Image (cartoon, rainbow, N blue to C red):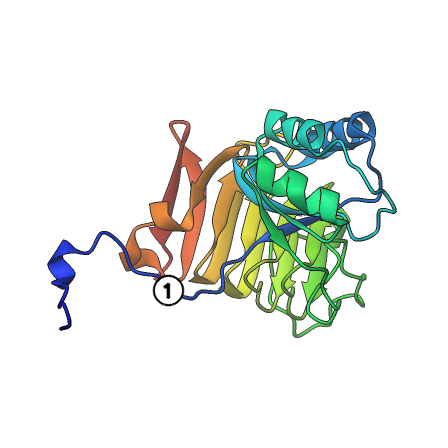
Amino acid sequence: MSLKVDRADMAFTFKGGMLPMTVMELASADPEQIREQLSGKLSQSPAFFQHTPVVLSVEKLDEPHLALERICAVCRTHKLLPVAVRGGTDPVKQSAWALGLGWFPPSDGARTRSLEEVPPVEAPTANAPESAASVASGGRIYRGTVRSGQQLSAPDGDLVVIGAVNAGAEVLAAGSIHVYGALRGRALAGIHGDTEAGIFCRELHAELLSVAGNYKRLEDIDPHLLGASVQVALRDAQLGITSLA
């Protein structure tokens, strides 16, 4: 005899999904060294450290036992949320489970990219789109796609991306950010506190938008603006998004 379950009475369903996730690859097991580096990163891009979930990769560490609880505490102090550990010995796996974290086996490296600066590109040609973000003003122009796991920054001015920013990628600028394509990753403008900075893109699907530390996540964006050409700016200390059409 089989029992039928009314879907209206179901509390949940399991679904597979591919969610963007930042991997924090540890090269040191020293919590104080990690704390020092995180403090420096926080001053560069504060909006990134807004309860961002991270996977702690310990694959490069030759440590049978880790101060995993202390490392997680350091991350949370800097507003990063460890959700899982990747790699490590069996004691590391057991520690992760004891702390309520997930555990992933070591990766084969085929799909991972270092969250580092993308290489510089050639100077713009005459037929490139004009923008206020010029090299002369300390800005940077990048031609091509910023891929998942990559980070592109203009620490002294505006940033122009003549291409797309993929999901899982991050673009940062001391000034404004201009994306001549789809913006699907994270865009952080005014990273040193410039409230006059803005974000401009031809197609909005961003995971996170930030201007001078004020941010919106994808779920906070008006659905009518998704896929549209928009500008993002601070108005009365609130992050506003308006259509450019």
* Image location (x, y in percent) of residue 88: 76, 50
The quadrant where residue 67 appears: top right
Q: Residue at x 12, y 58 (%)?
A: 8
- The correct choice, above or below, for 222 with respect to 235 in the image is below
Query: Quick check: 26 left or right of 23?
Result: right
- The correct choice, above or below, for 117 with respect to 110 in the image is above
Query: Quick check: 224 left or right of 95?
Result: left
The quadrant where residue 205 appears: bottom left
Q: Is residue 174 visible?
A: no
Between 26 and 225, the one lying in front of the other is: 26
Which residue in the structure is indicated by mark 1?
A: 15
Q: Residue at x 27, y 58 (%)?
A: 224
Secondary structure of the residue carrying tag 1 is: loop
For the residue marked with disc 1, what is the amino acid? Lys
The quadrant where residue 36 appears: top right
Query: Quick check: 149 left or right of 27?
Result: left
Neighbor class of circle 1 (other Cα within 10 Å; few <14, some 14-19, many 20+) is few
* Image location (x, y in percent) of residue 50: 53, 35
Q: Residue at x 62, y 24 (%)?
A: 77
* Image location (x, y in percent) of residue 57: 72, 49
Q: Residue at x 66, y 38 (%)?
A: 95
Q: Quadrant of the C terminus?
A: bottom left
